Amino acid sequence: MLSSNHNSSPQALLIDADDTLWENNVYFERAIAEFISFLNHHEFTPQQVRERLNEVERESIKTHGYGIHSFANALCNTFERLSVEQLTQELRERIRAFALRIAEHPVEIIAGVPETLRHLAGRRHHLILMTKGNPAEQTSKVERSGLKDYFAAVEVVAEKNAGAYHAVAEKYALDADVTWMVGNSPRSDVNPALEAGLHAVFVPHDMTWVLEHEELAAPTKTGQRLLRLDRFADLTSHF
């Protein structure tokens, strides 16, 4: 077990939500597949259409942030750029529906998550759910997940960068030497947490969003740790 006796501070675990606690990106991938099929482009391959959509999504995030409405906006903008057909109001509604259906999907908890959270909470770890995205959407998922009671707090941030981790650590007076970030995204969970001086646990998910892909950084300060686990349930062997 990893020691939590530094200055007698309780060990704190910041835990990601989407694709760490519950399935998320698989529904976006299905919506993208539906959109590409609907667009049915005669010059671009599905992969080329996807690459254009990725570019548009990167732009949309800067203006609209994350979430279903930002995604719906990106689908419509991609259609406008690639289709010779005019984007009528009717077409816009049909395309937005691919995205909006995601919100209707029940929260699908990843195997082993409730039991693992129960174990961690029972060992008196300080658990904070830390997710990025649209506050209303993320809060709704947390409420519907049935997992909220395992967490001392829920933080929904606009972006997960080193500054956000510093701010959360400061808000809750967390000791960086005994604070870990747990998640599936190198770009949002692991690398910026390490940059902020925290430890990190990487739990890969085979459907992690392409815009979250990044080379894993290495710990930079003395004593800093990076764990790589096959599944969330493996946390019980380390904490």
Image (cartoon, grey):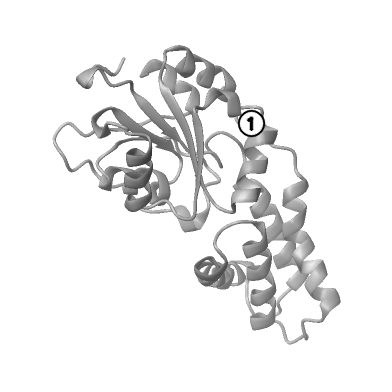
- Residue 135, horizontal then vertical, whole percent: 59, 50
* Image quarter in which the N terminus is found: top left
- Residue 136, horizontal then vertical, whole percent: 64, 49
Residue at image mark 1: 109
Tell me the amino acid under the disc marked 1. Answer: Ile
Identified at 49% across, 68% down, the residue is 62
Do we see residue 106 in this rendering? yes
Do we see residue 108 in this rendering? no
Identified at 36% across, 43% down, the residue is 190
In the picture, residue 171 is in which quadrant? Answer: top left
For residue 71, above or below residue 184? below
Identified at 71% across, 79% down, the residue is 42
- Residue 36, horizontal then vertical, whole percent: 70, 67
Identified at 32% across, 50% down, the residue is 162
Q: Exactly how many numbered labels are in the figure?
A: 1
Is 140 in front, or is 70?
A: 140
